Image (cartoon, rainbow, N blue to C red):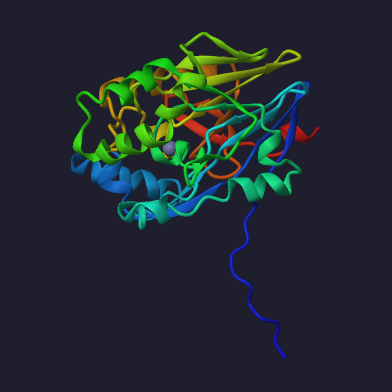
Amino acid sequence: MPAPMKGLLQPTIYRFQFGGFEVMPIMDSKAIRSGLTPAFGGEANADAVKALAKANRIDSDRYEHPFTPLLVNTGKELVLFDTGNGSLRDEYEQLKNRLPPGNLVARMGELGYKPEDVDVVVLTHGHPDHIGGLTKGGKEVFPNARYVFGATEFDYWNKGENIREARKLNRELYVKIVVPLGNKATMIKPGDEVVPGIRAVDCFGHSAGLMAFTIESEGKRMINWADTCNHYVVAIQRPDLQLDVDDDKEKAVATRKRILDMVNKEDMLVAGFHMPYPGIGYIDKDKDGTFRWVPHSYQMHL
Ligand SMILES: [Zn+2]
């Protein structure tokens, strides 16, 4: 009897040491999306994006889109950045084909942690794939955690002014899931410290108040840039292209350029929510000024 085929198997949990911290990117889920164009850069740049995909040996249309919350154990506190998709697709018909079911809690279990163990939940911003796992059936998924939300992001969704059509459902979700927890959350702004070693960075643009977070321990420094760049080829090699998912498109472009430049100059390790799993890498800069994603190999294992 020939052995049966078992299908694609790919890693969904990962842990490495960073100074005195342990860092764990967890793949909550992933989607295979079609339409690298016009999502990235619009119709006007479709040919350029297709050529870029070809030059980087990836499909010019379909792309893998992972959702990767980041768990950090500082030795004193267990800090979770973002919560994945949770069960949003079961609760909202409109999201059925858009968001896969979340697996964050199960995969956190494989790493040896229960939801009760999480001390701090930080939301980088309020898009569905980041807030979806915060509650389930109206109940908090991380019952012992304190919450850290960005003040600008919270105000934006809470007030609900000038929400574009494509984000109307997002606003509904934010008001239902995040706003009720606002009174017990710490509201922070760029530059504020979350816990010792973890500090917020202004990445406004992709959403009104998106924040990245530097993670620093024993002289090592990395950044969790969340959704600052949403695709490892297009958004990094062409940070100037406007994206359909960016809420303030011009500000998002300026932010991408600023953060890519900072990360490259300071030689920082990056964790990115939508980078190819485990979403850990570096940013190189070619002689012509083009930035490139360099996936982490074993630098953190030595
Ligand atoms: Zn996202």
Left or right of 270, for residue 152 = left
Q: Position of residue 83 (x, y in %)?
A: 53, 38
Identity of the residue drawn at 42% across and 49% down: 88
Whether 190 is drawn above or below 232: the answer is above
Q: Position of residue 55 (x, y in %)?
A: 41, 46
Q: Position of residue 87 (x, y in %)?
A: 47, 51
Residue 258 visible in image: yes
Give the image quarter of residue 215.
top right
Q: Quadrant of ligand 1?
A: top left
Q: Farthest residue toward the right? A: 302
Identity of the residue drawn at 56% across and 47% down: 28
Q: Farthest residue toward the top? A: 191
53 and 179: which is toward the camera: 179
Whether 153 is drawn above or below 33: the answer is above
Whether 99 is drawn above or below 224: the answer is below
Give the image quarter of residue 77.
top right
Q: Position of residue 133 (x, y in %)?
A: 51, 42
149 and 273: which is toward the camera: 149
Quadrant occupied by the C terminus: top right
52 and 244: which is toward the camera: 244
Identity of the residue drawn at 31% across and 27% down: 240
> How many discs appear?
0
Whether 218 is drawn above or below 66: the answer is above
